[in-house]
Amino acid sequence: MSRTTLALAASSFAALAMTITSAAGAAPAPTGEGETPTPTDEARSAGIEEPGDAAMGWKQRDVRTRTQAKAAAPSGVPGIDVSGWQGQVDWAGQYADGKRFAYVKATEGTNYTSDDFGHQYNGSYDAGMIRGAYHFALPNASSGADQANYFVDNGGGWSNDGKTLPGALDMEWNPYGATCFGKSQAQMQSWISDFLETYKSRTGRYPAIYTNTNWWNECVGHDTSFGDKSPLWIARYGDSAGTLPTGWGTHTFWQYTDKPIDQNVFNGTMDRLEVLAKG
């Protein structure tokens, strides 16, 4: 085959490859450091339209089928978690309904802080609840240390006033691309450790870890060290907390439904929740 023929063949193959790639545009490009993440189609169906929209348990909900029906509450101390999705919250009403703690989304990655964080965080406190902040992790966007510092600098700290829970690290499905954020289990373990140790050095406490068993076992694996440091906040919409991720023998919090708002229970009594807050 002549050089001219080879060149033409290569050119035709390249053009075909570009056509195939364009046609397969539904697959998101991986997001790396410094890039603006784009929500996947699945994330968009859950209402995530832009960076910052992600909230706890996003993969377990679909705005098209959400109802206002209440789920039966498991035993324990009732609480809720909120983000920009909820906007203004009737905190007095939530307290009257029995809620005694709240977690509020503060940050995502290192480029997003919730505009609603201040009034939600302070509103829950003013209503008499014990409250804490949470960070939605984007492990492919920047280091664990960078995100822990960003979280603490933007509302995610802790104080031993008896009314503030340690921050929570939200580790779950990536709404902007590959399920495990393009990381191996070893890399993910290292990223989480980086976050945890940085947060502890800044606040004196390890954060709670919010996750789902299926995601954790796939993306983090079976490292048992995290269970020795962080309280587990398990996400499972059902009638039991189910099988827990490797490393934990029990859960501290359980997010069991998003109807009519993300609802959780603390696995214990009110006095034990107060102990957790005081450290």
Image: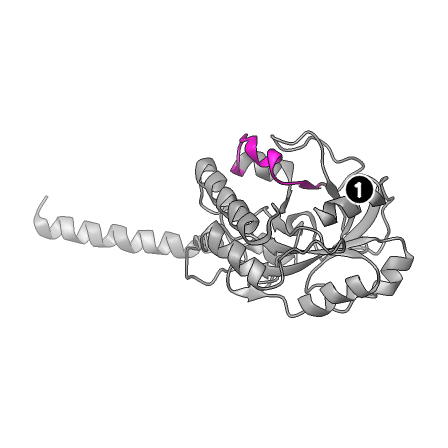
**Can residue 263 be spotted in the picture?**
yes
Pinpoint residue 267: horizontal percent, then vertical percent: 79, 39
At 65% from the left and 32% from the top, the residue drawn is 248
135 left or right of 86 in image: left
Pinpoint residue 36: horizontal percent, then vertical percent: 46, 63
Pinpoint residue 226: horizontal percent, then vertical percent: 57, 36
Q: Which quarter of the rendered picture does the N terminus lie within? A: top left
At 44% from the left and 45% from the top, the residue drawn is 182
**Which secondary structure, mark 1?**
helix
Residue in front for this viewpoint, 233 or 34: 233
Q: Of all residues shown, which one is farthest toward the right?
A: 96
Residue in front for this viewpoint, 46 or 73: 73
Q: How is the image coloured?
A: one colour
Residue in front for this viewpoint, 78 or 138: 78
105 left or right of 91 in image: left
Q: How many marks?
A: 1
Q: Amino acid at mark 1?
A: Arg
Residues rendered magenta in the picture: 219-235
At 80% from the left and 51% from the top, the residue drawn is 79
Q: Residues within 10 Å of mark 1 (few under 14, many from 20)?
A: few
Q: Is 1 in the magenta?
A: no
Rendered view: 241 above or below 172? above
**Can residue 86 be spotted in the picture?**
no
From the image, tell me which residue sits under label 1.
Answer: 272
Q: Is 231 in the magenta?
A: yes
Pinpoint residue 6: horizontal percent, then vertical percent: 14, 48
Rendered view: 123 above or below 7? below
Rendered view: 183 above or below 224? below
Q: Quadrant of residue 76?
A: top right
